[in-house]
Image (tube, rainbow, N blue to C red):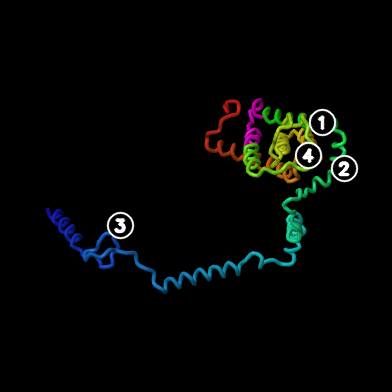
Amino acid sequence: MNGASATLRSARNRKAKPRPANAHLPNGAHLPNGAVARRPQDSPDMIKKRSSSTANDICCRVGNAHFLKWRAGDVLGVLRYHPVPCAFAVSLLFFMAVEYTLRMIPPMAPPFDLGFVATTALHQLLAARPALNTVLAGLNTVFVAMQTMYILWTWLIEGRPRSTIAALFMFTCRGILGYATQLPLPEGFLGSGADFPVGNVSFFLFYSGHVAASVIASLDMKRMERWELAYTFDTLNVLQVIRLLTTRGHYTIDLAVGVGAGILFDSLAGKYEDSKKTAGNYVKAQNMVI
């Protein structure tokens, strides 16, 4: 009985306990005198203290900057042990000078392509010999068929879909970019009915699917340590690049980006596979339905 009375008195005392005038009530509740509780504002001294702390932190970081600890031996070590980044730094300065002093190509003038300049003699040779141009186009189409067969083989026969996924990524992106910026057909283009796509149909110039697919196939061969086949594909890809420049079938930038696209989309396909394996949703290639 005494315990119950004590509990009742304690509850009444809690209810009767006055709330401070500056109490903070949730959700904008009203204080007893009708005022609304508000979050206290920082005093000017607190603001100055925080600003001073931030400034001191910045000064501390600058004072401990990594480059301030360099010595002459460290600088020479960069040149000795990291020559490739150093060469890139020099090339950056060189091409900045070239870019900012180069005369722009006029709107009505044909594009300047260094690959076309380098293959001028070969272009004249094929222009004078249409039959040879057709033979080379046919051989290039055979090489494209080899790329396609290998990429599909890795998925359908070996159950490794990475190259197929990479090719799908690559050709989808190529279609988007090729349609978004439709480059003019290079002057002096030497077409052939035996070239892929067969029949002298229209095609996107940017970027080269021929080159990108070859790179994707070659990268898979190297992962599987099929070195001889990989080096054969690389050699044929170089010859393909020379032929495409000679026939003006692609600009140099199309071919260079094709190499990068093959590497990029092969890497993305690998990340895609890893994400599916990690999530536990990876479907083996022999059970895939596309």
Contact between marks 2 and 3 (CB within 8 A): the answer is no
Which labelled disc corresponds to residue 121? 2
- Near-viewer residue (215 or 173): 173
Mark 4: amino acid: Phe
Residue 164 part of the magenta segment: yes
Describe residue 63's horizontal placement relative to residue 8 as left or right: right
Q: Which residue is mark 1?
A: 134
Q: Which portion, as a residue range, is magenta?
A: 154-168
- Near-viewer residue (15 or 237): 237
Residue 251 coordinates in the image, percent (x, y): 75, 44
Describe residue 167's horizontal placement relative to residue 252 as left or right: left
Where is residue 263, by image quadrant? top right
Dividing the image into 4 quarters, which one contains the C terminus? top right
Secondary structure, mark 1, is helix
Residue 115 part of the magenta segment: no
- Near-viewer residue (210 or 30): 210
Look at 83% across and 33% down and name the residue there. Answer: 133
Describe residue 83's horizontal placement relative to residue 131 as left or right: left
Q: Which residue is mark 4?
A: 189
Residue 22 coordinates in the image, percent (x, y): 28, 67
Q: Earlier in the sequence, mark 2 or mark 4?
A: 2
Taking the view exactly as shown, the residue that stands out farthest to the left is 1
The crowd level at tag 3 (other Cα within 10 Å; few <14, some 14-19, many 20+) is few
Residue 252 coordinates in the image, percent (x, y): 76, 45
Mark 1: amino acid: Thr
